[in-house]
Amino acid sequence: MARIAKAVARTSPLKGGTDLFSDLPEAAPRRPAGKSARAAARVRTGESGYTARDIEVLEGLEPVRRRPGMYIGGTDEKALHHLFAEVIDNSMDEALAGHASFIEVVMEADGFVTVTDNGRGIPVDPHPKFPKKSALEVIMCTLHAGGKFDQNSYKVSGGLHGVGVSVVNALSSKLQLKVWRDGKEHFIEFVHGDAVAPLKVVGEAHGKRGTEVTFLPSREIFRMTEFDWATLAHRLRELAFLNPGLRIVLADQRHAVERREEMRPR
């Protein structure tokens, strides 16, 4: 017992002995608050190098052009074909809703791709939230704008997994839209995501209805901009097989002899 009492006396701070942290090195003596101490404090906080001016706010489609990988996974061949998927999904949504029975895809000789359907056509009337712009322009120039967010426009949609046609517009050097609706043919053109001029009526629809999207992926963004026939054909065959009554045509005009294939469910 005497030995235990002596051990406690040596380790107990109440008896003037060393405490349980006696093996740790002693703290360095406090320096006077001089110039070097203030500089060290600034380095520790980093406040002088990170201020409100460093917080950047990107508006419109600029985030897509600045960081395409966040929206389509990169700038490689797979990402390039993601653009086509976004456009064809819009036409497929019209077919799934029972408004379109025909889709044509043309790989143009100049590198453009054109997707045409005979659906209802993208709405062209002024948007309630942006009365100075047509709904079509709002859809093409605004992220997360479309008819798939409410529960009425599309009961079933195949494009809810995507990022929207506005991303296609943002990543295309040029995109042209024709809409046949309300007995009129409407036209608008975009360059690098920005409208060249407001939507305008260019003629009569002559009984035609639907939407035509023609776009050219930006060579400044993508490593390659040539679409692969086999990739597009495979995707369209799948869609034709899964949607009885839908007629899909794929044409390749990039070569001297045009390739053309029509997909119908058997």
Image (cartoon, rainbow, N blue to C red):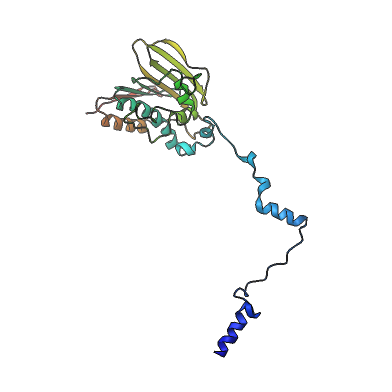
Specify the quadrant of the image occupied by residue 57.
top right
Give the image quarter of residue 7: bottom right
Q: Residue at x 67, y 46 (%)?
A: 49
Q: Locate the N terminus by quadrant.
A: bottom right
In the image, taking residue 239 as reference, residue 202 lies left or right, namely right
Q: Which residue is outermost to the front?
A: 14
Residue 40 vertical placement versus 169 (above, below): below
Q: Position of residue 13 (x, y in %)?
A: 63, 77
Report the front residue among 244 and 125. 125
Q: Is residue 189 above or below residue 80?
A: above
Q: How many marks?
A: 0
146 or 187: which is nearer to us? 146
Tell me where residue 169 appears, x and y as whole percent. 47, 27
Q: Which of the two residues, 12 or 145, is positioned nearer the viewer here?
A: 12
Task: Determine the residue located farthest toward the left in the rendered image.
Answer: 266
Residue at x 77% of width, y 55% of height: 35
**Quarter in which the C terminus is drawn:** top left
Residue 265: x, y in percent? 24, 28
In the image, residue 185 sits, relative to residue 146, either above or below, namely above
The furthest residue to the bottom: 2
Relative placement, left or right, of 83 versus 22 is left
Pick the residue in front: 146 or 198.
146
For the point 70% across and 67% down, which residue is it?
28
Residue 146 position, x and y percent, is 42, 27
Vertical side of 254 occupied by 20: above or below = below
